[in-house]
Image (tube, rainbow, N blue to C red):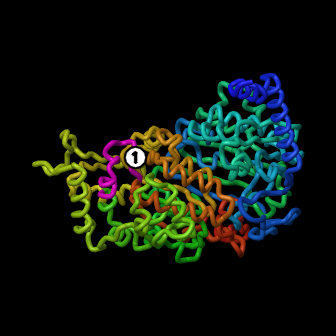
Amino acid sequence: MNTAQAAARVRAKDRVNPLQAAAALALGLILTLAAVTLARAEETIIKAHGFAEFGELKYQQGFDHFDYVNPEAPKGGELSISAVGTFDSMNPYTRKGRAGALSSAQFESLLVDSYDEPGSYYGLIAESLEYPESQDWVIFNLRPEAKFSDGSPVTADDVVFSHNILLEQGLKSYAEAVRKRIPKAEALGPHRVKFYFSPDFPRRAMITQVGGTSVFSKAWFEADPENRRIDEPRLDPGIGSGPYVLESADVNQRIVYKRNPDYWGKGLNVNVGRHNYDRIRVEYFGDDVAAMEGFKAGVYTLRPENNSKNWASNYEFAAVDKGHVIKGEFPDGNVPAASGFVMNLLKPKFQDIRVREAMQLAFNFEWTNESLQYGLFRHRSSFWQDSPLAAEGLPEGREKEVLEALGDQIDPSILTTEPVMAHASKASRPGDRKNLRRAMKLLDEAGWTVGDDGMRRNAQGEPLKVEFLADSPTIERIVQPYVANLRTMGVDAVLNRVDYAQYTSRRREKEFDMISSAYPMSLEPSTGLYQYFGSEAHEYSVFNPAGLADPAVDALIGNIVDAKTQEELRANARALDRVLRAKRFVVPTWYLDVNWIAYWDMYRQPENLPPYDTGLLDLWWIDAEREAELKAAGALR
């Protein structure tokens, strides 16, 4: 045998029969699947009365009530508050028109949040939940006693239906995001429902996402499916399982909710000391001036205040002097909403960051605060202002590592400079000359030069037009000096105040250049960040008014959602804060660390209000004796 023959024989011996190979592969797959199945079977299943994003729940199984409630709070009386504007629907999920105030309050969810521990939730409709350590799925065990307001039971079929109808008829940005992350929900029995989570997404906040979804009556919707759609306006709100039901709705006048005397959940530990009013009335007014006068006259009796002019000067009336009306300031432990004037990045003129920085520099917070807001506000810089999630100084430690991992997706100067801060201006005049000169130089560099008529145009001769869309005289008063500064710079800026319905429609369709808006932030941010800042639905998401789309932002949001520890979450949040601020798509405005609440002296509240909610709607109560005294004195009708 020659060498070639010997080599051929060796190669022949090494060859594997195709059938043998297939059999071996199949066996390997079977063994692998068996191993995975065994591992999953052995995986610890957690069963609990609640769920905490990080750490442990404060309240143990069988707790009596939340620490911040008054378990002896009397039931009765009426909470009366105001709303400014109009409404044409009592369906809070409609894509058209404007829903009435508190119209979503009658719908309950599987879990309810705690007001004194961020990221913690306890069973409401669900008495318990089960999930593996991997959080690949979750099972909720519903309370058999849970009922809708018509007396029909709340079942697993209702929960599955609610999840699916929001995917089919709800907001597009919400539906698309949730469908990818939660591919399936199924009823395992009358009171047992299971949600499956996609392996392609981090697990964090999946459980709280489904646990916080409103539960609707499947039977009510299916009785008239054409006229009972989630996405269409209607004055019939349907039925929920909550403590209040709609009593009456007079379009653009008032809405009244009354206590459901047969509310199934009034004895639950999570409800002890809560839902203390017999009725909740919302009075509608055409503008805030009329609403303020209504409060003075006692047309309604409790007013959360957000207008600094009112707070500083409009509470000098007889009822305050006599002690009939109380001006209360209550600490706010929440992260302040990231408020500001938001630029629509879908507009070509805002693509250049120099234009965006110029728009920021034209706003004079110091003059606005001192001259128009009585010096009561503070200037916001961070999206997580005054919290451990706010970026400060130079990036270091884990935050620096996170930013470095983004490579060329971010401006390298972010790694070597302090985070962008809100610019300072002189309070002596509306326009700070130094800042305006700097802004005009930036516009020159961006190719928007001043013509003979004093207006700025680009190389194509198109003017730099900026329309500020508003629906409120309060914001109109603040924006007018800002618009004047822009016009001084040669920008064709205009303020266009429209009615509430038109404003809502144009905001949804992103038919604006700039609006006043706010991003609600939290101490434990999660999947909601995709809605606010993510690329996935940036062109149409109503939660992303700027239309922001950026791969570095997407990556950081993914890191936050995937965080396994609070330290990892905070490092990534600080990195995201730094990147968002560097994008300059918001002109940061003001914030408060207290809640201003004026109320007629018949309302009472628990001694230790929780840090994350003032509890106006569900923790306060009416002192019936004091109310009678006010009426006897002629102070109230």
User: Would you say residue 474 is visible in this rendering?
Assistant: no
Q: Extreme front residue here?
A: 1
Snapshot quadrant of residue 366: bottom left
Choose between 54 and 616: the one closer to the eye: 54
Say left or right for 416 vs 176: left
Please name the residue that numbered disc 1 is placed on. Answer: 344
Residue 459 among magenta residues: no
Snapshot quadrant of residue 269: bottom right
Residue 343 among magenta residues: yes
Residue 34, image x, y percentages: 86, 39
Say left or right for 141 vs 541: right
Task: Quarter of the image for the C terminus: give it.
Answer: bottom right
Above or below 333: residue 282: above
Q: Residue at x 29, y 60 (%)?
A: 362
Q: Which residues are magenta?
A: 341-358
Snapshot quadrant of residue 373: bottom left
Above or below 160: residue 115: below
Question: Callout 1, which amino acid?
Answer: Asn
Choose between 462 and 23: the one closer to the eye: 23
Residue 274, image x, y percentages: 76, 61
Q: Looking at the image, how many numbered discs can be counted on the residues? A: 1
Q: Secondary structure at mark 1?
A: loop
Residue 98, image x, y percentages: 54, 41
Residue 19, image x, y percentages: 81, 22
Above or below 321: residue 358: above
Task: Quarter of the image for the N terminus: give it.
Answer: top right
Q: Residue at x 58, y 76 (%)?
A: 323
